[in-house]
Image: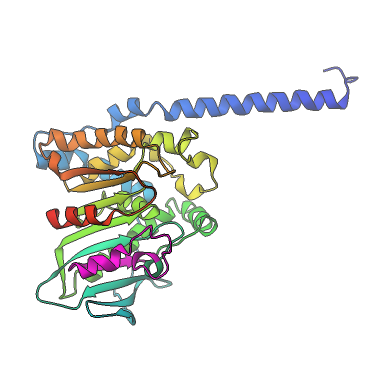
Amino acid sequence: MNRDMKEGLIQRRIDDRQRLQRRETEDFLRSEIEKYPERQKKIWRRDYSSAENYLSSVEPNRKRWLETVGDFSKGASEDFAVEEEPFLEDKKVIAKRVSIKLFSQLKGRAILGLPKSRNNLFPLIICQHGHTSSPDGDVFGLIDKANYYDAYGYKLVKEGFAVLAPLNITMTEPMARFNRMALLLGKSLFGLEIFKIRRFIDYLSTLKEIDKNRIGMWGLSKGGTYTLFTLPVEKRIKVGIISAFFNHRIKKMAIEDPRYSCYLATDEEHMFLPNWLKEFTDSDLVSLICPRPLMIQTGKADGVSWWPFVLEEFKNSREHYKKLKIEDRIKMCLHNNGHEIRFEEGLKFLKCWL
């Protein structure tokens, strides 16, 4: 280097080399992510000869998915230490706030709604709120002014279902903070919230009003994330509905496009899990839900996805059901609106399979 070069020119050369290094690095990492199909062929060895053989063939992948999100079951509280307080009551619905002990220093909180008419055991639907939402304000419809949720938890209770609406951590900054702490343990915030859902199923299975053999889960947005993430490891959940989350995962995570939001361009760092795209696209996670019934709800006007890419991933998901000759158990609900619950379609699906 010529020491007589002007300082501005030196800095420009430094910046140019840094820019080139960044571009090459991003291009390399994206190309590695896009090699997913090559990894998929080596990692997944599905046997479609029978439902029993199929489940056995994907069991190693199921265990690795739990390792990916993180298993928090070790050291959990042996007793529930249940605490309750009234939340809502009208002619058809009675709901209460419920907390249970997860660990000595941590409680799980939720709203539990039951129909007032109690002739039979109630099927249970876990209704999971999204990123900036809440069980009471959105799932039960107290302050959902834009009506994204259509008070679907409250309406399900009126239809004869028991509803559990768990409270999860919301907002980008605290989710990132707690996820960083969980990563230091080789786990994730998702894993902790999934454990909470499973622990609530443990508790609700002891209640005389609940039919523990008929449990479903339905979530919107980040609640859809938890539905897609939980069903692969929680076999007691027999039916799932994923609203406004299911996606072409490689594109959604790492390929920016003006037609949808890409997580790479956001500060939602809690969405980046080690090994996620080493093995588990959305259609592969669906293969861990199969043969249980599943509905995907996607809006053509929803900015979180570009619907033709969603249909591409759904087609891959449907193949697992098709090869097992149970294609009627998976359904796409594609509509012309945006980021929202489609209640009537989901209700019909739940009543069909639960």
Relative to 183, is 174 above or below? below
Q: Is residue 333 left or right of residue 169?
A: left
The answer to which of 179 and 343 lies nearer the viewer is 343
Q: Position of residue 128 (x, y in %)?
A: 34, 60
Q: Quadrant of residue 141?
A: bottom left
Q: Position of residue 80 (x, y in %)?
A: 30, 75
Q: Position of residue 318 (x, y in %)?
A: 21, 36
Write the residue at 36% across / 47% down: 337
Q: Look at the image and give the residue range highlighted in magenta.
A: 138-167
- Image quadrant containing the C terminus: bottom left
Relative to 224, is 18 above or below? above
Write the residue at 69% across / 24% down: 17
> Is the image coloured rainbow, by chain, by secondary structure, or in one colour?
rainbow
Relative to 133, is 297 above or below? above
- Image quadrant containing the N terminus: top right
Viewer can see residue 132: yes
Q: Position of residue 11 (x, y in %)?
A: 80, 28
Write the residue at 14% across / 33% down: 323
Most extreme residue toward the front, as rendered?
Answer: 336
